[in-house]
Image: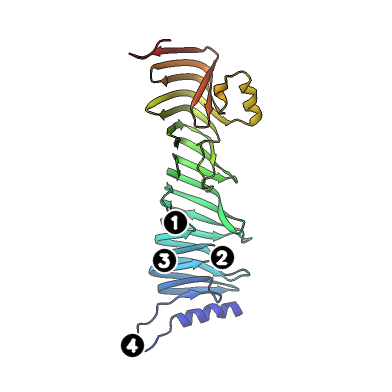
């Protein structure tokens, strides 16, 4: 009963008149400790009290609120849901925010016409459901995410709540820029799962990935398209730009890849098309085993790109040459800047390299 009266007194106090000659304050709903508050309310309907919870329907232009225990601030035209008082502080639960909704958490803002927020039963996380089109942006514009609908699971980690899983559906676009590194993904359905220092993307129904890394006067670009697969990158929440735009990839369907590097005005380029593609960042042992048969110029060997099944390849290995190839399998060796160090063709291999007009000779 005590918690009920805390809420009631907050409502009564918030709707009282101030000194003569001043305008009446708008109603507000606040916890006793101040860690939870909703203000700027035009219409308020308290539906029920249930133990330590109050269920409500609020309208405003807009309503503004905060929930410190969940680490969010929010605003919208309407909020239906409940607020619960519990050990550790009050929080928002079973809530639907509608009309010009903005939910801010840390440096990121979610914008949509409707957002649903629910707290996990163990208070160690929450779920945000987005039934309509939404956008997530960072305050410095280094990150952007768009989709027609989706959901996000947040979990407690080191005293903060971080994204664990995000399921994005319909016209999905994900962008992350960090210093000299730029990455983007587009597709019809993408699931993101944070794995500590990396982010795993599960991709379905067709997708495109673009990555660009600039380092020491060299710009390396990758453009990938495939029907489905998985891609692992450095964590999107890690903050530090990496030379390697990919950590791993397993792509299926008719896969197309374009790898381009520009340095001092010279461009090397590779186009590959195949039935599947596997990208692996090499362990130290794997690297040393390969280097036993390679030249000293391969010391920066970092990854392999293995393409299998009806492989076609077009390449510009330098300013003076162009070429094409075909095989059942092609292994492409890459350094830390995604520069192609060499190729290995297996199974019905064919490779033609020709000098360009005015170029060198083979």
Query: How many numbered circles are shown?
Result: 4
Q: CA distance from mark 2 to mark 3?
A: 21 Å
Query: Would residue 1 be seen by someone viewing this image from the given angle?
Result: no
Label 3: element kind? strand
Question: To which residue does mark 3 refer?
Answer: 78
Question: To which residue does mark 4 refer?
Answer: 21
Callout 4 environment at 10 Å: few (<14), some (14 to 19), or many (20+)?
A: few
Contact check, label 1 and label 2, Cβ < 8 Å: no
Callout 3 environment at 10 Å: few (<14), some (14 to 19), or many (20+)?
A: many
* Mark seen at residue 109: 1
Q: CA distance from mark 3 to mark 1?
A: 18 Å
Q: Earlier in the sequence, mark 4 or mark 3?
A: 4
Where is residue 33, by image quadrant? bottom right
Q: Earlier in the sequence, mark 4 or mark 1?
A: 4
Residue, far bottom: 20
Q: CA distance from mark 4 to mark 1?
A: 39 Å
Disc 4 versus disc 3: nearer the observer: 4
Q: Residue at x 44, y 72 (%)?
A: 39
Q: Earlier in the sequence, mark 1 or mark 2?
A: 2
Q: Earlier in the sequence, mark 3 or mark 1?
A: 3
Q: Earlier in the sequence, mark 4 or mark 2?
A: 4
Establish if 5 lies above or below 146: below
């Amino acid at each position: 009963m005590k918690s009920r009266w805390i809420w009631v007194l907050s409502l009564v106090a918030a709707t009282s008149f101030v000194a003569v000659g001043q305008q009446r304050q708008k109603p507000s709903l606040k916890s006793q400790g101040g860690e939870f508050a909703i203000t700027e309310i035009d219409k308020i309907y308290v539906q029920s009290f249930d133990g330590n919870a109050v269920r409500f329907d609020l309208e405003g232009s807009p309503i503004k609120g905060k929930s410190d225990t969940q680490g969010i601030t929010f605003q919208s035209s309407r909020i239906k849901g409940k607020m619960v008082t519990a050990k550790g502080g009050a929080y928002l639960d079973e809530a639907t925010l509608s009309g010009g909704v903005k939910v801010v958490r840390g440096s990121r803002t979610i914008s949509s016409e409707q957002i649903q927020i629910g707290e996990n039963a163990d208070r160690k996380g929450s779920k945000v459901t987005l039934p309509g089109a939404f956008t997530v942006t960072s305050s410095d514009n280094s990150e952007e995410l768009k989709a027609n609908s989706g959901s996000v699971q947040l979990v407690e980690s080191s005293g903060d709540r971080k994204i664990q899983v995000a399921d994005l559906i319909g016209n999905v676009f994900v962008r992350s820029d960090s210093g000299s590194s730029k990455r983007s993904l587009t597709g019809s359905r993408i699931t993101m799962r944070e794995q500590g220092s990396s982010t795993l993307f599960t991709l379905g129904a067709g997708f495109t990935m673009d990555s660009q890394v600039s380092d020491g006067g060299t710009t390396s670009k990758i453009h990938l398209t495939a029907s489905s697969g998985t891609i692992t990158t450095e964590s999107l929440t890690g903050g530090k730009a990496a030379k390697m735009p990919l950590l791993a990839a397993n792509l299926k369907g008719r896969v197309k890849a374009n790898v381009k590097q520009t340095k001092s005005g010279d461009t090397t380029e590779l186009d590959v098309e195949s039935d599947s593609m596997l990208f692996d960042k090499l362990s130290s042992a794997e690297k040393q085993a390969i280097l036993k048969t390679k030249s000293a110029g391969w010391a920066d060997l970092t990854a392999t790109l293995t393409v299998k099944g009806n492989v076609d390849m077009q390449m510009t290995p330098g300013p003076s040459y162009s070429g094409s190839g075909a095989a059942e399998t092609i292994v492409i060796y890459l350094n830390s800047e995604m520069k192609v160090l060499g190729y290995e063709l297996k199974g019905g291999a064919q490779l033609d390299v020709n000098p360009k007009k005015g170029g060198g000779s083979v």
